[in-house]
Image: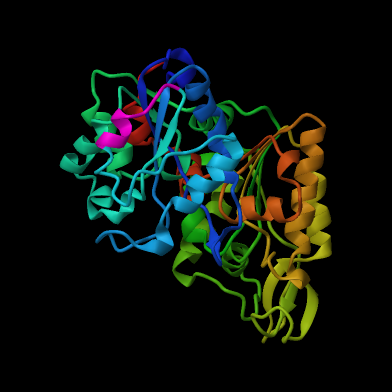
């Protein structure tokens, strides 16, 4: 079911309360990746360019929830947003519940950013009284924070509830995420390939089971592949496996025989004697891994096998890297898969990269702009791939 967006409303002269996701990484006082701020720009500009007043709220990091903490202040995000918009962004004070006067003083076309919502424990608790204070700032509610759509936080659920009777719509980012992660996957153009990687089978199990009936092929790489290979009786050396998930892996391997889906697993492995970038002995093994070695990336034969499959795809969903891509000796597998997906996209495929590590990988390899869609939400994108519904989205007005 489609949801109304900010484009369907006239915000002129109105206070538009927007939940954004400015939870950006900060190191040594610098934002290291401002993609989440940039992704919010179309929604913010749509409001202020049409004479609305944009009141933005977000969380950042994991503060204690007992008041202001300088290291988690959204000041830095406000400064970056101001640079990107080319206009000042008001930042009233260190308490998001004490901004009524600043909101009342706003003129049409202005932007105000509230301080970190999580300086109050009430945000994580979904507290209605806290939500009512925030709801009082707005005539319209906009959810443009996909990264937190799966959370029942006050700003995501209790605030739109408190604003019942007023317009409650999604921003352009949330609209785009739903279009790709829900609508595209509901009716994928075939062949449809799902690529799953990362450390844990347990994290991806629900997504595998939800996508299996729709997919033509499921590619499994990363550390989670070793649980599947162990389930098939192969020697995986000292590779990370989840012993308690071997029955689940066996069940999925058996399911693939019943369904018309092919599971592709690594056939060779880049291994090391240590979980370290440089200090271990690195070797490539075909099929079985020698005792004392752990798999840290897919090998060259697997890279070719996966790439050949991906180049034929028309819809691709990718969530999770093929190895420890942050370390150069083990980055090749993830890079080659990313390149193959970029190539398929160039040839007309729709490619959806789940957030988190996969998003970081395509950024690292300068391939983000070669994908159809790179999700801004790690946990949220995975839950949507599992077919879950989000209360924060269900509460919004239907289109």
- Place of residue 129 in the rendered image (x, y in percent of width and height, measured from the top left): 16, 41
- Horizontal side of residue 161 vs 321, given as left or right: left
Which residue lies at the image location 67% right of the left edge and 80% below the top edge? 276
Q: Which residues are magenta?
A: 100-108
**Number of marks in the image?**
0
Q: Examine the rendering and report whether any part of residue 375 can be seen.
A: no
Q: Is any atom of residue 362 visible in this view?
A: yes
> As drawn, is 209 to the left or to the right of 188?
left
Above or below for 129 versus 296 = above
As rendered, which of 76 and 367 lies closer to the eye? Answer: 76
Where in the figure is residue 221, as x and y percent of width and height?
Answer: 66, 59
Residue at screen point 64% across, 80% down: 275
Position of 45 with respect to 98 (left or right) is right
Q: How is the image coloured?
A: rainbow
Query: Height in image: 386 above or below 187?
Result: below
The answer to which quarter of the image holds residue 140 is: top left
On the picture, is 187 further left or further right than 15?
Answer: right
Residue 80 place in picture, x, y as percent: 56, 46
Where residue 335 sits: x, y (%)? 77, 56
Q: Quadrant of the C terminus?
A: top left
State the quadrant of the N terminus: top left
Q: Residue furthest left?
A: 129
The front one of 13 and 314 is 13
Asked whether 267 or 53 is in front, the reply is 53
Residue 35 position by quadrant? top right
Q: Residue at x 81, y 34 (%)?
A: 346
Decide which of 27, 332 is in the foreground and name it: 27
Q: Is residue 308 magenta?
A: no
């Amino acid at each position: 079911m489609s949801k109304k967006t900010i484009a369907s409303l006239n915000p002129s002269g109105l206070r538009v309360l927007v939940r954004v996701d400015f939870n950006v990484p900060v190191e040594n006082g610098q934002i290291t990746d401002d993609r989440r701020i940039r992704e919010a720009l179309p929604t913010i500009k749509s409001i202020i360019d049409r004479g609305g007043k944009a009141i933005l709220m977000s969380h950042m990091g994991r503060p204690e929830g007992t008041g202001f903490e300088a290291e988690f202040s959204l000041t830095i995000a406000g400064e970056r947003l101001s640079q990107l918009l080319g206009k000042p962004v008001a930042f009233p004070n260190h308490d998001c519940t004490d901004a009524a006067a600043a909101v009342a003083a706003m003129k049409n076309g202005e932007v105000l950013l509230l301080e970190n919502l999580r300086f109050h424990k009430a945000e994580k608790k979904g507290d209605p009284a806290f939500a009512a204070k925030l709801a009082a700032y707005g005539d319209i509610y906009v959810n443009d924070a996909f990264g937190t759509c799966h959370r029942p936080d006050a700003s995501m659920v209790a605030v739109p509830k408190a604003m019942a009777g007023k317009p409650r719509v999604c921003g352009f980012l949330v609209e785009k995420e739903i279009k790709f992660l829900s609508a595209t996957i509901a009716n994928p153009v075939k062949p449809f390939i799902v690529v799953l990687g990362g450390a844990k089978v347990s994290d991806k199990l629900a997504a595998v089971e939800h996508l299996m009936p729709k997919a033509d092929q499921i590619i499994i790489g990363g550390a989670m592949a070793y649980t599947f290979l162990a389930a098939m009786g192969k020697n995986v050396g000292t590779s990370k496996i989840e012993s308690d998930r071997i029955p689940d892996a066996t069940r999925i391997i058996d399911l693939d025989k019943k369904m018309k889906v092919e599971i592709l697993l690594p056939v060779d492995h880049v291994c090391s004697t240590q979980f370290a970038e440089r200090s271990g002995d690195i070797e490539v093994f075909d099929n079985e891994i020698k005792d004392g070695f752990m798999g840290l990336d897919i090998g060259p034969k697997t890279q070719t096998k996966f790439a050949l499959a991906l180049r034929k795809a028309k819809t691709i969903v990718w969530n999770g890297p093929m190895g420890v891509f942050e370390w150069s000796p083990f980055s090749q597998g993830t890079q080659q898969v990313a390149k193959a997906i970029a190539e398929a996209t160039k040839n007309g495929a729709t490619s959806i990269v789940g957030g988190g590590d996969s998003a970081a990988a395509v950024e690292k390899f300068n391939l983000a702009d070669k994908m159809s869609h790179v999700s801004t939400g790690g946990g949220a994108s995975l839950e949507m791939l599992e077919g879950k519904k989000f209360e924060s989205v269900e509460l919004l007005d239907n289109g």
